[in-house]
Image: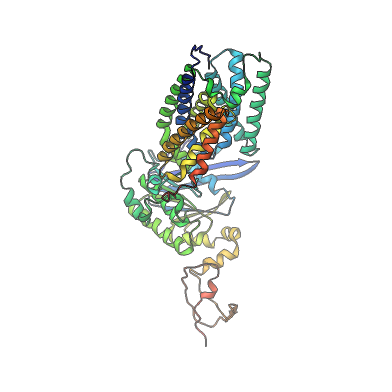
Amino acid sequence: MPNTITSSTDMDDFFIRALAAGLGAALVSAPIGCFIVWRRMAYFGAALAHAALLGVAVGFLLSINLVVAVVVVCVLVGLALFALQRQRSLADDTLLGILAHAALAAGLIAIAFMDSLRIDLMTYLFGDILAVTVTDVLWVWVGGVVVLAGLAAIWRPLLSITVHEDLARVDGFPVTRIRFLFMLLLSIVIAVAMKIVGVLLILSLLIIPPAAARRFATTPEQMAGLGAILGGIAVAGGLAASLQWDTPAGPSIVAAASLLFFASFAIPHRQAG
Amino acid sequence: MQHEILPGSLIEVRGATVRHNGHATLDSVDLTVRAGEIVTLIGPNGSGKTTLVKIALGLSRPESGTVQRKDGLRIGYMPQHLTIDRTLPLTVRRFVSLGIKGRASGLEEVLDDVGVAYAIDSPFQALSGGEARRVLLARALLGEPDLLVLDEPSASMDVIGQGEFYELIRRIRDEQGCGVLLVSHDLHLVMAATDQVLCLNHHICCAGQPEAVAQHPEYLALFGTEIRDSLAVYTHEHDHHHDLTGEAVDHSEHGHSVHKHAEHGDAEHDHVEHGHG
């Protein structure tokens, strides 16, 4: 994300930017995150998020836009994983662990070789939502709209694949293409939301709000919508807590989302199955 | 390589061969399903049934051999295993209509046909094993298929439920004239509902009418005498009776009778005592 010089240091401004970026990230994370929950892809999501750090390093090395660099690297790591899965020599979660940490290590090494003044590693590992620029906010919202539009376009085939891949194939859905598109959308979410909570916590923004919404949803769409709302509440709550008690913002958002998740068990609801 | 598909055939597989680690999973296997015909594929676990079904469905290709499908063939597929993660809120209605583009017309009728209309608004995960199989069948039927491919369709049903289920499949075939490819590891329950049986153990061991296959030496070698005995309760003529402890007692003088049992395996406990004083 290129740095945009902003003259305003006014507290309201940075808080509003942080809120705008966080809400945008939460809104797009929940619907994508639903599929991560339904398809049991949490490890896969974590692997792509770890690979994002390598993308940051590559972006700095080649002096290209960091969002683009992260998306490209995430997609390449995802493709490498698909290729490795075809070997069937190791279990998927083992492969994911290897690939995730190989990418993370490579990213950390590459960043260590670069001018340390230019990259604050903590920003990318844990996010720095309070430092987001107007440009960052725009990236989140433009990226978010693109991702939501793309997800809407593949929603039904993706649901079909989630239920049963072979059945979806027999029904005539282009399974491989849909899976690739989903990976691309996930990579974009990681790239634009990375600044908010960082690569180490981004998975929580993807899966905790949908998990909290599950007990109250009777359709996939309800779970995605309610997840987005709960994600938004977590962002607002985490930011407020951060402001009030001077806690780190990214972890506060994750903590707020986790509180919502545990609170969801306490709220009575009609049986959703 | 390609051959012309015969009139009336829905799918023709010729000489399909698949190797895995040097062993032939399928060795030059032929399979034909015609419209209005129920073909049962039977074989022990690991005999290549699933591989052959995937080839028939177009999910994978044989290393050698040809596969021909009728132009525009619509396939309704019922997989052997389908578990939907409990975190996915999906009603039966939504599940059944997932494979259909646009509005699913006739959804209620199809669910009614297979006997689970009452569950239309239930979450899929709340269904019993038998109900889930029926819903899967409904999903396969909703697209008005020319060919139904049913992989172990009666798994997780009790024996009575299985009998009803195969009766239902036969009725659907009669009403809709579709071809059916049925996979089973267990011939005796599908006998009444099948026209052709292919006994598979990497190659086609024997094929033909169910009664003929049931007596075939290769079939008996694969499935052993245990199966033959439980199968035989359907048609065999008794040459023995059972004493009060259930032990078989030779008694060749008594009159013959033919039993029909709804159960298998331990049928000796249900035999009607007869023909001796």
Q: Where is residue A16 in the image (x, y as percent from the top left)?
A: 45, 22
Q: Residue at x 60, y 59 (%)?
A: B221
Residue A173 appearing in the image:
no
Left or right: A221, with B158 as reference point: left
Visible residue check, residue A159: yes
Would you identify the image quadrant in which residue A119 lies?
top right
| Residue B147 locus on image (x, y percent) | 40, 47
The quarter of the picture where residue B265 lies is bottom right
A220 or A30: nearer the eye?
A30
Residue lying at the far front of the rendered structure: A244
In the depicted structure, whether residue A140 falls above or below residue A167: above
Q: Nearer the viewer, residue B228 or A236?
A: A236
Q: In front here: B252 or A149?
A: A149
Structure colour scheme: rainbow
Q: How many labels does the image show?
A: 0
Please name whichever residue, A72 or B53, is drawn nearer the observer in this view of the structure. A72
In the image, is residue A25 above or below residue A270?
above
Instruction: Tell me the residue at 48%/68% (across/down).
Output: B234
Looking at the image, residue B69 lies above or below residue B258 = above
Q: In this view, does B131 lie above or below A178?
A: below
Q: Position of residue B186 (x, y in %)?
A: 52, 59
Percent coordinates x, y for residue B142 in the rendering: 36, 46
